Image: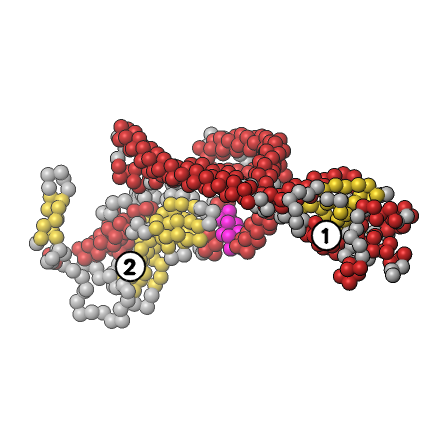
Amino acid sequence: MLSSLTIRALLVAAVFGLAIPTATQAQAPAPIPSMVEGLSPEAIDAIIEGAQADAPATLAVANRTIVVLHASVLGRSAAGRVNAAGGVLAEVTGGGAEYRATSRQVRAAALISVNGRDVFAIVPADVDALLGETVESKAQTTVVRLQQALDEIAEARRPAALVRGLAEAVLATVAFVLAIWLLRRARRRAAIAIEGITKQTLSSTGVGGELVNQTRLLQWVRHSVNILAVAIGLPLAYIWLFFVLRRFPYTRPWGESLRSFLIDRLVWLAEGVAMAVPGLVTVVIIVLVTRLVVRLVRILFAAVEEGRVVLPKVYPETAMPTRKLITGLLWLLALVVAYPYLPGSGTDAFKGVSVFVGLLISLGSSGLVHQVMSGFSIVYSRALRTGDFVRVGDVLGTVTFMGTLATKVETPGREEITIPNAVVVAQTVTNYSRHSAQGVFIGTEVTIGYDVPWRQVEALLLLAASRTEGLRRDPAPKVWQTALEDFYVRYRLLLCLDDQRRRGAVMNALHANIQDAFNEHGVQIMSPNYEADPNAPKVVPKAQWFAAPAIFPRPVSDGKSEGVEK
């Protein structure tokens, strides 16, 4: 015989969803609602008050979530209560075709029953107060969910219902496949029709077919049609999957979750758009104001560059880079001001992207910043301008482009050389165009022996300069004796060019005229040097100036001369 205390413990364990050892279960009677009457209200209250918070456990029946329990009762955890309730439900639904879930209030708790058999209890400790739950509301929700799961269990045991669901799923699948097939045919026909219309329209405008192929316009048309077809096909697939899953009791919760997921996503998007509208309006206003200020800055610095406006410390050659710098700072300021109003700026994903971009800039900015600052140094030191003829290290040519990172120089041989700005700053830069209005002297040297009068040498060099086109007459060429060497005198002819960009051609002609002038007067050029006087002067007689295969010039009708073989 069992004692009165043992019987009451068994009754309480059954009522509040506690697992009971198998040996005891064999001796205990099946719990029924009237068994609770054997417990005093004080005992029930003591059990309810003794419930402790525990890790939540979810009771699921027929693939549906029924209730989440949060309390341990009489030392049994929430997970143990869920397992016990699952075992009772398995026994209750083991046979029969009709099930009815009910609940009733027992002091501060609620008992959930199926077909008159108590399954588990909901105590106040199971309630999530933050969600606004009460024992009564949670019990009502649990009964509704449990009844829906029990109905689906009964439906799954009716062959007629399963056959009907299978037939509906097959018909829906056939309809879906037919719709996809029609959609593919429509896509192909639409692509062909739109391509034909596009070609006809372009032909009427006179645009060549080769140009159309190069721009890949027809490929973009086909891609647009494909995207439209996918946009139609995806909703069809979603509807088909939602319909098929709802045909069967076990998969019906998945179908309902698909529907709720779509609705939740649409609601979420709508709410997000509605909440983002004020911020987007603010961003648009910031962008418009910044664009207005940037246009005003562009107009102002364009006037400075053209010389119509004078600003302190701003020169025409520095107006354009200064405008670019101010424009960049204005847009950066606009980005900083508009950032808090951008949708999603406060999300972790947005912050992660910001950190990633900052890391990339930090890793790769050292060399970049060095080049940019070097570019600013070149611009604001006014060492170079576009169009200047300069020498940068060993590179001689015309500056064609001055960028933020590099400077491009075109040599007299029409070679384009790109020099990093940091290299330009580190090199010695000679600018031949900066003072070209007053005249920039360049020179060439010859060495002549001491037996030739220096006045004759000076006259011959000036004679060669007078015969050369492309040299300026003001300031006039001049000759300097730069050194008295052991065996000869070093003479330097200084002259100014009309156009520094023709330097190579002019110097070529000058050197030719120097040789002709010295040969005409029998003066030997000692360059590079010599150690003893030759037996005869090393000069070329005029009769041998055009020895074969050289071309002898002859006059033509336009006053110029053309060469013929002599």
Q: Residues within 10 Å of mark 1 (few under 14, many from 20)?
A: many
Q: Can residue 192 be seen in this view?
A: yes
Q: Is mark 1 on a helix, strand or loop?
A: helix
Counting from the top left corner in percent of width and height, residue 133 is at 77, 40
Counting from the top left corner in percent of width and height, residue 311 is at 53, 34
Vertical position of residue 160 compared to residue 523: above or below: above
User: In this view of the protein, which residue sits in the foreground, 363 or 527?
Assistant: 363
Q: Which of marks 1 and 2 is nearer the N terminus?
A: 1
- Which residue is most to the left? 566
Tags 1 and 2 touching, CB below 8 Å: no
In this picture, residue 115 sits left or right of residue 513: right
Vertical position of residue 226 compared to residue 74: above or below: above
Q: Can residue 435 be seen in this view?
A: no
Which region of the structure is painted magenta?
Answer: 366-378
Task: Give the residue at x 13% y 38%.
Answer: 558
Task: Give the residue at x 51% y 52%.
Answer: 368
Q: How crowded is mark 2: few (under 14 residues within 10 Å), some or many (20 or more)?
A: some
In this picture, residue 419 sits left or right of residue 332: left
> Which disc, if any, is residue 153?
none
Image quarter for residue 265? top right
Q: Name the residue under label 1.
A: 88
- Which residue is most to the bottom? 532
Task: Give the residue at x 77% y 47%.
Answer: 118
